[in-house]
Structure formats: structure tokens, C-alpha cells
Amino acid sequence: MNNAATSHSNANASFGADSTEGVVYWSPVKAGPWTLHLAATAQGICYIGSADQPLDEVKAWLSRRLPKHRLVRDDDALVPYAEVIGHYLAGKREALDVLQMDLHGTPFQQAVWQALRELPYGCISTYSDIALRIGKPQAVRAVGTAIGANPVLMGVPCHRVIGKSGALTGFRGGLAMKRVLLELEGVAVGKT
């Protein structure tokens, strides 16, 4: 298992010379207090799993989004991503924006995820705010659904979105993980 704090020079994985088409590389990574499954194509990271969840979570996502791809374990290929995530979780970097990402979703989901990537470190937003940002103020529920489908936790910082009332709301990684990420970023979090 990779340790997310290991040293590596850049966040773009080297996947070797052989054909990488149709392959998603994966590795379990110890990242902060959690074990996360990371997955990447030759184009970039495509999935960061929920805290301490089995590989089945990645397999289920892959069968929905990239059904013609196969999973191949390659711990070395995921080390650069693990390093960046480890630095973020250690409070040594404010964003995972250096990660090359390969996001797979509908055009609407892509728009929502891009709006999330523009949210500054340590700032929170609401579902309504995101709907306004993408020019679809009536699509608040659809925004929530798109946020729930975010495949790259932390890289696409959906943990920065809370309910209009200020309450912590759904997060694929669980509310405990969301709370830890927000507190890491210096956001005061209530008991919800």
C-alpha cells in the first residue's frame, strides 16, 4: 500500500510504454487517517474512493462510467497522486489543482464539477450558489445529484458545499470525512 506522504516529483503518473487504452490503474493509499482507493487512466486521476471503502466502490463506478475499461493494480503509477493528496491532508497544500484529472460525466455534471473546482480553499458554498454559478438557478436538486456523482473527492472539492441552512449535508465519503476536510481548511463546522 502506498503512503500518501511519500515523495515524488510530479502529479502526472508515468504509465509505461505499453498501450494504456482501456485501462484504469488503481492502488490503495494510506492518506491521512484513511485508506483510499485511487484510480487513474493515462490521462489523469479519474476516481478517489471514499474513506476506508473496499475496491468494490471503484469497480461499481467503473462499470457505470467506463464499462469497456479494465482495472489494473499499479501502485507505482498512483504514487504521484498519493503524494499530492497526502500533502493536502497534512495541511501542506491548499488544493489538488495540480492533479491531472480525467473526469467522466455528462455535460451538466462537468459544469457543476468545474464550478466546484473554482471554490477557494477554506470557503463554503451552497447548492443554490452552485446552481447560480452555472447559470441554472432552478436546477438546485440536479446540482445536488451532480455533486453526489463527483468521482474525485477532494480534487473536485464537493466537501465545500453545505445546505442553505448551514448544515452539513450528504457527501459520498460520509459526513465524518466531510467534517474533517472542512476543519482541515479552517471552516468552523457545527454539530450537524
Image (cartoon, rainbow, N blue to C red):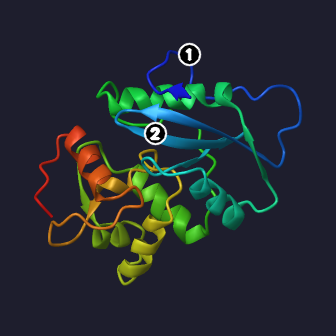
- Report helix, strand or loop for mark 2: strand
Badge number at residue 9: 1
Which of 150 and 78 lies nearest the eye of the viewer? 78
Q: What element carries label 1?
A: loop
Q: Where residue 49 sits: x, y (%)?
A: 51, 49
Circle 1 or circle 2, nearest the eye:
2
Q: Check the image and report above or below for 144 versus 111.
A: below
Image quadrant assignment for residue 169: bottom left
Image quarter in which the C terminus is found? bottom left
The extreme bottom residue here reads 138
Question: Which one is earlier in the sequence, the residue at label 1 or at label 2?
Answer: 1
Amino acid on which disc 1 is placed: Ser
Report whether 63 appears left or right of 107.
Answer: right
Quadrant of the rendered image containing residue 105: bottom right
Residue displayed at 42% across by 29% down = 86
Left or right relative to 144: residue 121? left
Crowding near the residue tagged with mark 2, few <14, some 14–19, many ≥20 C-alpha atoms within 10 Å: many
Number of marks:
2
Residue 67, horizontal then vertical, whole percent:
77, 63
Please state if 9 lies on the left or on the right of 156 as rendered.
right
Tell me the number on the disc at residue 26. none
Between 62 and 152, the one lying in front of the other is 62
Is residue 21 at all visible to an observer of this figure? Answer: yes
Residue on which disc 2 sits = 35
Give the x, y percent position of residue 15: 75, 29
Query: Disc 2 marks which amino acid?
Result: Thr
Quarter of the picture containing the N terminus is top right
Compared with 27, 127 (above or below) is: below
Give how far apart the Cα atoms at labels 1 and 2 are.
22 Å
The image position of residue 165, as x and y in percent, is 14, 72
